[in-house]
Amino acid sequence: MPSLGADMKAGTLVAWRVKPGDRVKRGDIIAEVETEKGLVEVEVFEEGVVDQIFVQPGEKVPVETVLAMIRPEGMPAVSAPAEVPQAAVKEHVPAEAGPEVKPGLEVSHLPGQPPQRRIRVSPLARKLAAELGIDLSTVQGTGPMGAIERADVERAAAKRLAEKAPTPSVSEKPGPPTMEKPAVTEFQIGMRRAIAAAMSRSNREIPHYYLETRIDMSRALRWLEAENQRRSIKERLLPAVLLIKAVARALGEVPELNGYWIDDRLQPQEAIHIGFAISLRQGGLVVPAIHHVDLKSLDELMEALRDLITRVRAGRLRSPEMTDATITITNLGDLGVEKVFGVIYPPQVALVGFGKITEQPWAENGMIGIRPVLTATLAADHRATDGHQGGRFLEALNRHLQEAAKL
Protein backbone atom coordinates (compact mmCIF):
# COMPACT_ATOMS: atom_id res chain seq x y z
CA MET A 1 0.00 0.00 0.00
CA PRO A 2 1.75 3.15 -1.16
CA SER A 3 1.84 6.20 1.06
CA LEU A 4 -0.18 8.79 -0.84
CA GLY A 5 0.72 11.64 1.48
CA ALA A 6 2.40 12.30 4.81
CA ASP A 7 -0.94 12.04 6.56
CA MET A 8 -1.96 8.63 5.18
CA LYS A 9 -1.91 5.67 7.56
CA ALA A 10 -3.95 3.08 5.65
CA GLY A 11 -5.93 2.62 2.48
CA THR A 12 -8.68 0.41 1.13
CA LEU A 13 -8.01 -1.51 -2.05
CA VAL A 14 -11.07 -0.86 -4.22
CA ALA A 15 -10.20 -2.76 -7.40
CA TRP A 16 -7.39 -4.42 -9.29
CA ARG A 17 -6.78 -3.43 -12.91
CA VAL A 18 -4.54 -6.49 -13.40
CA LYS A 19 -4.59 -10.18 -12.59
CA PRO A 20 -1.89 -12.82 -12.09
CA GLY A 21 -0.11 -13.47 -15.37
CA ASP A 22 -0.59 -9.95 -16.78
CA ARG A 23 2.48 -8.12 -18.06
CA VAL A 24 2.95 -4.61 -16.69
CA LYS A 25 5.32 -1.78 -17.43
CA ARG A 26 6.29 1.40 -15.65
CA GLY A 27 3.42 3.87 -15.55
CA ASP A 28 0.60 1.34 -15.90
CA ILE A 29 -2.39 1.80 -13.60
CA ILE A 30 -2.69 -1.47 -11.70
CA ALA A 31 -5.11 -0.74 -8.87
CA GLU A 32 -7.51 1.75 -7.31
CA VAL A 33 -7.17 2.73 -3.66
CA GLU A 34 -9.65 4.62 -1.50
CA THR A 35 -8.05 7.09 0.91
CA GLU A 36 -9.46 9.71 3.21
CA LYS A 37 -8.89 12.19 0.38
CA GLY A 38 -10.67 10.19 -2.28
CA LEU A 39 -10.07 7.52 -4.88
CA VAL A 40 -6.50 7.29 -6.23
CA GLU A 41 -5.18 5.26 -9.14
CA VAL A 42 -2.00 3.37 -8.25
CA GLU A 43 0.77 3.25 -10.84
CA VAL A 44 3.47 0.59 -11.04
CA PHE A 45 7.16 1.50 -11.20
CA GLU A 46 8.52 -1.85 -12.31
CA GLU A 47 8.29 -3.99 -15.41
CA GLY A 48 7.44 -7.66 -15.29
CA VAL A 49 4.63 -10.11 -14.79
CA VAL A 50 2.09 -10.02 -11.98
CA ASP A 51 2.89 -13.18 -10.05
CA GLN A 52 0.67 -13.08 -6.97
CA ILE A 53 -1.92 -10.79 -5.42
CA PHE A 54 -1.99 -10.62 -1.63
CA VAL A 55 -4.69 -8.08 -0.87
CA GLN A 56 -8.20 -8.45 -2.21
CA PRO A 57 -10.67 -5.69 -3.09
CA GLY A 58 -12.46 -4.41 -0.03
CA GLU A 59 -9.55 -4.94 2.34
CA LYS A 60 -8.16 -2.01 4.30
CA VAL A 61 -4.45 -2.36 5.02
CA PRO A 62 -1.72 -0.16 6.54
CA VAL A 63 0.71 1.83 4.42
CA GLU A 64 3.71 -0.28 3.27
CA THR A 65 1.69 -3.49 3.16
CA VAL A 66 2.73 -5.52 0.13
CA LEU A 67 -0.24 -5.69 -2.22
CA ALA A 68 1.15 -7.98 -4.92
CA MET A 69 4.31 -9.58 -6.28
CA ILE A 70 5.74 -8.73 -9.71
CA ARG A 71 8.47 -10.98 -11.07
CA PRO A 72 10.91 -10.05 -13.85
CA GLU A 73 10.04 -11.24 -17.32
CA GLY A 74 11.46 -14.71 -17.95
CA MET A 75 11.68 -15.82 -14.34
CA PRO A 76 9.53 -18.79 -13.37
CA ALA A 77 6.38 -18.18 -11.40
CA VAL A 78 6.35 -18.96 -7.70
CA SER A 79 4.60 -22.29 -7.40
CA ALA A 80 3.63 -22.13 -3.74
CA PRO A 81 1.78 -19.19 -2.26
CA ALA A 82 4.31 -16.70 -0.99
CA GLU A 83 4.16 -15.74 2.64
CA VAL A 84 2.42 -12.45 3.12
CA PRO A 85 4.85 -9.93 4.59
CA GLN A 86 4.39 -9.04 8.24
CA ALA A 87 3.16 -5.53 7.44
CA ALA A 88 0.12 -6.95 5.70
CA VAL A 89 -2.19 -6.77 8.69
CA LYS A 90 -5.53 -6.62 7.00
CA GLU A 91 -8.70 -5.04 8.18
CA HIS A 92 -11.86 -6.03 6.35
CA VAL A 93 -14.47 -3.41 5.72
CA PRO A 94 -17.31 -4.66 7.93
CA ALA A 95 -20.38 -5.94 6.16
CA GLU A 96 -23.59 -4.10 6.73
CA ALA A 97 -26.94 -5.57 7.53
CA GLY A 98 -29.24 -6.23 4.62
CA PRO A 99 -27.88 -6.95 1.17
CA GLU A 100 -24.69 -8.95 1.15
CA VAL A 101 -21.53 -6.90 0.75
CA LYS A 102 -19.07 -8.44 -1.63
CA PRO A 103 -15.52 -7.10 -1.70
CA GLY A 104 -14.28 -5.22 -4.69
CA LEU A 105 -15.67 -3.04 -7.37
CA GLU A 106 -17.86 -5.85 -8.47
CA VAL A 107 -20.47 -6.22 -11.15
CA SER A 108 -23.65 -7.58 -9.67
CA HIS A 109 -27.36 -8.04 -10.22
CA LEU A 110 -29.72 -6.10 -8.05
CA PRO A 111 -32.51 -7.91 -6.25
CA GLY A 112 -35.77 -7.40 -8.04
CA GLN A 113 -34.14 -6.08 -11.16
CA PRO A 114 -34.08 -7.72 -14.56
CA PRO A 115 -31.09 -10.01 -15.04
CA GLN A 116 -29.50 -7.60 -17.49
CA ARG A 117 -29.47 -4.78 -14.89
CA ARG A 118 -25.82 -4.63 -13.80
CA ILE A 119 -23.99 -2.07 -11.72
CA ARG A 120 -20.45 -1.48 -10.56
CA VAL A 121 -20.04 -0.23 -7.03
CA SER A 122 -17.12 0.19 -4.64
CA PRO A 123 -17.33 -1.55 -1.26
CA LEU A 124 -17.30 1.73 0.65
CA ALA A 125 -20.07 3.11 -1.51
CA ARG A 126 -22.15 -0.03 -0.96
CA LYS A 127 -21.55 0.10 2.79
CA LEU A 128 -22.46 3.79 2.97
CA ALA A 129 -25.57 3.23 0.86
CA ALA A 130 -26.74 0.53 3.26
CA GLU A 131 -26.13 2.81 6.26
CA LEU A 132 -28.04 5.68 4.68
CA GLY A 133 -30.78 3.51 3.17
CA ILE A 134 -29.97 4.53 -0.39
CA ASP A 135 -31.20 2.28 -3.21
CA LEU A 136 -28.15 1.79 -5.42
CA SER A 137 -30.33 1.29 -8.48
CA THR A 138 -31.29 4.98 -8.24
CA VAL A 139 -27.71 6.25 -7.96
CA GLN A 140 -25.83 7.59 -11.00
CA GLY A 141 -22.24 6.39 -10.90
CA THR A 142 -19.43 8.74 -11.95
CA GLY A 143 -16.54 6.30 -11.53
CA PRO A 144 -14.82 4.18 -14.18
CA MET A 145 -17.34 2.53 -16.50
CA GLY A 146 -20.13 4.16 -14.49
CA ALA A 147 -19.06 2.66 -11.17
CA ILE A 148 -20.81 4.06 -8.12
CA GLU A 149 -18.41 5.65 -5.65
CA ARG A 150 -18.81 7.09 -2.20
CA ALA A 151 -19.31 10.64 -3.47
CA ASP A 152 -22.18 9.42 -5.68
CA VAL A 153 -23.96 7.92 -2.67
CA GLU A 154 -23.41 11.11 -0.67
CA ARG A 155 -24.96 13.17 -3.45
CA ALA A 156 -27.94 10.83 -3.61
CA ALA A 157 -28.40 11.08 0.15
CA ALA A 158 -28.25 14.87 0.06
CA LYS A 159 -30.79 14.95 -2.79
CA ARG A 160 -33.17 12.69 -0.91
CA LEU A 161 -32.83 14.83 2.22
CA ALA A 162 -33.66 17.95 0.23
CA GLU A 163 -36.69 16.29 -1.36
CA LYS A 164 -38.02 15.22 2.02
CA ALA A 165 -37.57 18.61 3.62
CA PRO A 166 -41.02 19.93 4.60
CA THR A 167 -42.34 22.92 2.68
CA PRO A 168 -43.49 25.58 5.13
CA SER A 169 -47.15 26.54 4.87
CA VAL A 170 -47.86 30.08 3.80
CA SER A 171 -50.36 30.49 6.63
CA GLU A 172 -47.96 29.25 9.26
CA LYS A 173 -45.72 31.70 11.03
CA PRO A 174 -42.03 30.86 10.87
CA GLY A 175 -40.86 29.23 14.04
CA PRO A 176 -37.73 30.07 15.96
CA PRO A 177 -34.45 29.03 14.35
CA THR A 178 -33.48 25.50 15.20
CA MET A 179 -30.12 24.60 16.71
CA GLU A 180 -29.69 21.46 14.63
CA LYS A 181 -26.18 21.00 13.34
CA PRO A 182 -25.68 20.37 9.61
CA ALA A 183 -25.07 16.79 8.60
CA VAL A 184 -21.39 15.91 8.37
CA THR A 185 -20.55 13.16 5.95
CA GLU A 186 -18.07 10.41 6.55
CA PHE A 187 -15.96 11.83 3.73
CA GLN A 188 -15.76 15.26 5.33
CA ILE A 189 -14.78 13.72 8.66
CA GLY A 190 -12.05 11.68 7.04
CA MET A 191 -10.79 14.63 5.04
CA ARG A 192 -10.57 16.90 8.08
CA ARG A 193 -8.84 14.13 10.01
CA ALA A 194 -6.21 13.76 7.28
CA ILE A 195 -5.63 17.51 7.04
CA ALA A 196 -5.44 17.81 10.82
CA ALA A 197 -2.78 15.10 11.00
CA ALA A 198 -0.59 16.67 8.32
CA MET A 199 -0.89 20.24 9.55
CA SER A 200 -0.37 19.28 13.19
CA ARG A 201 2.80 17.46 12.22
CA SER A 202 3.92 20.47 10.20
CA ASN A 203 3.44 22.96 13.03
CA ARG A 204 4.92 20.52 15.54
CA GLU A 205 8.06 19.58 13.59
CA ILE A 206 8.83 22.36 11.10
CA PRO A 207 10.23 25.70 12.28
CA HIS A 208 8.63 28.05 9.76
CA TYR A 209 9.89 31.43 8.70
CA TYR A 210 7.81 33.76 6.53
CA LEU A 211 8.69 36.36 3.91
CA GLU A 212 6.47 38.45 1.68
CA THR A 213 6.94 40.77 -1.26
CA ARG A 214 4.75 42.91 -3.49
CA ILE A 215 4.99 42.32 -7.23
CA ASP A 216 3.94 44.81 -9.92
CA MET A 217 1.88 42.67 -12.31
CA SER A 218 1.17 45.35 -14.94
CA ARG A 219 3.76 44.01 -17.43
CA ALA A 220 2.69 40.39 -16.97
CA LEU A 221 -1.02 41.18 -17.33
CA ARG A 222 -0.47 43.33 -20.41
CA TRP A 223 1.48 40.52 -22.05
CA LEU A 224 -1.19 37.98 -21.05
CA GLU A 225 -4.02 40.13 -22.42
CA ALA A 226 -2.26 40.61 -25.75
CA GLU A 227 -1.40 36.91 -25.95
CA ASN A 228 -4.97 35.82 -25.21
CA GLN A 229 -6.40 38.14 -27.84
CA ARG A 230 -4.56 36.07 -30.44
CA ARG A 231 -6.03 32.84 -29.12
CA SER A 232 -9.41 31.18 -29.16
CA ILE A 233 -11.32 31.03 -25.89
CA LYS A 234 -10.37 27.38 -25.47
CA GLU A 235 -6.67 28.13 -25.84
CA ARG A 236 -6.44 31.13 -23.53
CA LEU A 237 -4.04 31.17 -20.60
CA LEU A 238 -4.92 31.89 -16.99
CA PRO A 239 -2.79 34.16 -14.79
CA ALA A 240 -2.22 31.14 -12.50
CA VAL A 241 -0.17 29.50 -15.25
CA LEU A 242 2.27 32.42 -15.27
CA LEU A 243 2.63 32.19 -11.49
CA ILE A 244 3.30 28.44 -11.55
CA LYS A 245 5.88 28.73 -14.30
CA ALA A 246 7.58 31.69 -12.61
CA VAL A 247 7.87 29.68 -9.39
CA ALA A 248 9.55 26.86 -11.32
CA ARG A 249 12.01 29.30 -12.92
CA ALA A 250 12.84 30.82 -9.54
CA LEU A 251 13.40 27.37 -8.04
CA GLY A 252 15.93 26.75 -10.78
CA GLU A 253 17.96 29.59 -9.28
CA VAL A 254 17.32 28.65 -5.63
CA PRO A 255 17.11 24.83 -5.65
CA GLU A 256 17.42 24.60 -1.86
CA LEU A 257 13.68 25.33 -1.63
CA ASN A 258 12.76 22.46 -3.94
CA GLY A 259 12.99 19.21 -2.00
CA TYR A 260 12.38 17.36 1.24
CA TRP A 261 13.62 17.35 4.82
CA ILE A 262 14.21 13.67 5.56
CA ASP A 263 16.61 11.97 8.01
CA ASP A 264 17.61 15.30 9.53
CA ARG A 265 18.98 16.74 6.32
CA LEU A 266 17.84 18.65 3.27
CA GLN A 267 17.41 16.52 0.16
CA PRO A 268 17.03 18.89 -2.82
CA GLN A 269 15.25 17.40 -5.82
CA GLU A 270 16.37 17.95 -9.38
CA ALA A 271 12.88 17.55 -10.84
CA ILE A 272 10.45 20.37 -10.09
CA HIS A 273 7.02 18.93 -9.30
CA ILE A 274 4.73 21.69 -8.04
CA GLY A 275 1.79 20.77 -5.84
CA PHE A 276 -1.22 22.97 -6.49
CA ALA A 277 -3.78 23.24 -3.69
CA ILE A 278 -7.29 22.55 -5.04
CA SER A 279 -10.40 22.74 -2.85
CA LEU A 280 -13.05 20.07 -3.23
CA ARG A 281 -16.74 20.79 -3.67
CA GLN A 282 -17.61 18.39 -0.84
CA GLY A 283 -15.12 20.09 1.50
CA GLY A 284 -11.42 19.83 2.19
CA LEU A 285 -8.58 20.10 -0.29
CA VAL A 286 -5.98 18.03 -2.08
CA VAL A 287 -2.54 19.06 -3.36
CA PRO A 288 -1.72 17.00 -6.46
CA ALA A 289 1.55 17.61 -8.27
CA ILE A 290 2.09 18.95 -11.77
CA HIS A 291 5.20 17.12 -12.91
CA HIS A 292 8.27 18.72 -14.49
CA VAL A 293 6.83 22.23 -14.54
CA ASP A 294 10.18 23.72 -15.54
CA LEU A 295 10.20 21.63 -18.74
CA LYS A 296 6.64 22.47 -19.82
CA SER A 297 5.62 25.32 -22.10
CA LEU A 298 2.83 27.63 -20.95
CA ASP A 299 0.40 25.80 -23.24
CA GLU A 300 1.42 22.40 -21.84
CA LEU A 301 1.15 23.78 -18.35
CA MET A 302 -2.33 25.17 -19.02
CA GLU A 303 -3.44 21.80 -20.37
CA ALA A 304 -1.93 19.98 -17.38
CA LEU A 305 -3.64 22.31 -14.92
CA ARG A 306 -7.00 21.95 -16.65
CA ASP A 307 -6.68 18.17 -16.73
CA LEU A 308 -5.64 18.04 -13.08
CA ILE A 309 -8.58 20.12 -11.87
CA THR A 310 -11.01 18.01 -13.92
CA ARG A 311 -9.68 14.77 -12.48
CA VAL A 312 -9.63 16.15 -8.92
CA ARG A 313 -13.33 17.00 -9.22
CA ALA A 314 -14.00 13.48 -10.58
CA GLY A 315 -11.85 11.78 -7.93
CA ARG A 316 -9.45 10.34 -10.51
CA LEU A 317 -6.01 11.27 -9.20
CA ARG A 318 -2.97 9.03 -9.73
CA SER A 319 -0.63 7.93 -6.99
CA PRO A 320 2.51 9.86 -8.16
CA GLU A 321 0.48 13.05 -8.23
CA MET A 322 -0.26 12.60 -4.53
CA THR A 323 3.31 11.90 -3.48
CA ASP A 324 5.75 13.62 -5.83
CA ALA A 325 5.22 17.32 -5.10
CA THR A 326 8.52 19.01 -4.20
CA ILE A 327 6.94 22.35 -3.25
CA THR A 328 3.36 23.61 -2.90
CA ILE A 329 1.55 26.66 -4.26
CA THR A 330 -1.63 27.93 -2.67
CA ASN A 331 -3.60 30.67 -4.41
CA LEU A 332 -6.58 32.27 -2.67
CA GLY A 333 -6.74 35.36 -4.84
CA ASP A 334 -10.06 34.35 -6.40
CA LEU A 335 -11.60 34.48 -2.91
CA GLY A 336 -10.46 38.06 -2.37
CA VAL A 337 -7.63 37.15 0.01
CA GLU A 338 -4.75 39.60 -0.35
CA LYS A 339 -2.05 37.65 1.52
CA VAL A 340 -1.63 33.94 2.24
CA PHE A 341 0.73 32.63 4.90
CA GLY A 342 0.58 28.88 4.40
CA VAL A 343 1.65 25.82 6.36
CA ILE A 344 4.33 23.63 4.78
CA TYR A 345 3.21 20.15 3.73
CA PRO A 346 5.81 17.73 5.16
CA PRO A 347 8.35 16.54 4.15
CA GLN A 348 8.50 19.48 1.71
CA VAL A 349 10.52 22.50 2.82
CA ALA A 350 8.61 25.42 1.31
CA LEU A 351 5.20 26.74 0.31
CA VAL A 352 4.43 29.75 -1.90
CA GLY A 353 1.26 31.75 -1.36
CA PHE A 354 -0.45 34.11 -3.81
CA GLY A 355 -3.23 36.54 -2.98
CA LYS A 356 -5.57 38.71 -5.02
CA ILE A 357 -4.17 41.17 -7.56
CA THR A 358 -5.36 44.60 -6.39
CA GLU A 359 -4.77 48.14 -7.57
CA GLN A 360 -2.36 49.85 -5.18
CA PRO A 361 -0.19 52.98 -5.11
CA TRP A 362 3.22 52.21 -6.59
CA ALA A 363 6.31 54.42 -6.58
CA GLU A 364 8.92 53.94 -9.32
CA ASN A 365 11.64 56.24 -10.65
CA GLY A 366 10.36 59.05 -8.48
CA MET A 367 6.85 58.78 -9.87
CA ILE A 368 3.74 57.54 -8.10
CA GLY A 369 1.07 55.64 -9.97
CA ILE A 370 -1.59 52.98 -9.57
CA ARG A 371 -0.51 49.45 -10.48
CA PRO A 372 -2.04 45.96 -10.26
CA VAL A 373 -0.09 44.47 -7.37
CA LEU A 374 0.22 40.86 -6.24
CA THR A 375 1.44 39.90 -2.78
CA ALA A 376 3.56 36.74 -2.86
CA THR A 377 4.57 35.00 0.35
CA LEU A 378 7.04 32.26 1.16
CA ALA A 379 6.75 29.88 4.09
CA ALA A 380 10.02 27.97 4.40
CA ASP A 381 11.60 25.39 6.70
CA HIS A 382 14.29 27.10 8.77
CA ARG A 383 16.13 23.80 9.18
CA ALA A 384 16.65 23.63 5.43
CA THR A 385 17.20 27.27 4.46
CA ASP A 386 17.57 30.74 5.88
CA GLY A 387 15.94 34.01 5.01
CA HIS A 388 18.77 34.77 2.59
CA GLN A 389 17.74 31.93 0.26
CA GLY A 390 14.09 32.83 0.73
CA GLY A 391 14.78 36.43 -0.25
CA ARG A 392 16.70 35.33 -3.34
CA PHE A 393 13.75 33.17 -4.35
CA LEU A 394 11.20 35.99 -4.08
CA GLU A 395 13.52 38.34 -5.97
CA ALA A 396 13.87 35.77 -8.76
CA LEU A 397 10.09 35.19 -8.80
CA ASN A 398 9.49 38.92 -9.24
CA ARG A 399 12.10 39.16 -11.99
CA HIS A 400 10.61 36.31 -14.01
CA LEU A 401 7.11 37.76 -13.76
CA GLN A 402 8.43 41.04 -15.20
CA GLU A 403 9.47 39.06 -18.31
CA ALA A 404 6.38 36.96 -18.89
CA ALA A 405 7.12 36.53 -22.59
CA LYS A 406 10.19 34.48 -21.67
CA LEU A 407 8.36 32.08 -19.37
Image (cartoon, helix red, strand yellow):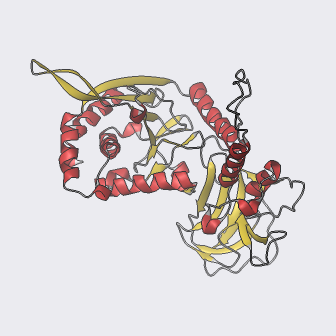
Q: Is residue 368 above or below residue 198?
A: above
Q: Is residue 299 above or below residue 70?
A: above
Q: Examine the rendering and report whether any part of residue 30 can be seen.
A: no
Q: Examine the rendering and report whether any part of residue 347 can be seen.
A: yes
Number of numbered discs present?
A: 0
Taking the spot 65% from the left edge, 36% from the top edge, the residue there is 192
- In the image, taking residue 267 as reference, residue 72 lies left or right, namely right
Looking at the image, which residue sits at the far front? 171
Q: In which quarter of the view is residue 364 placed?
A: top left
Taking the spot 51% from the left edge, 56% from the top edge, the residue there is 311
Residue 377: percent from left, percent from top: 38, 28
Foreground: 404 or 338? 338
- In the image, taking residue 220 as reference, residue 90 lies left or right, namely right
Looking at the image, which residue sits at the far right? 97
Q: Is residue 113 above or below residue 406?
A: below
Taking the spot 55% from the left edge, 34% from the top edge, the residue there is 264
Foreground: 164 or 85? 164
Quadrant that contains the N terminus: bottom right
Q: In which quarter of the view is residue 360 placed?
A: top left
Foreground: 148 or 349? 148
Q: Is residue 352 above or below residue 278?
A: above
Residue 398: percent from left, percent from top: 25, 33
Residue 342: percent from left, percent from top: 47, 29
Taking the spot 74% from the left edge, 28% from the top edge, the residue there is 180
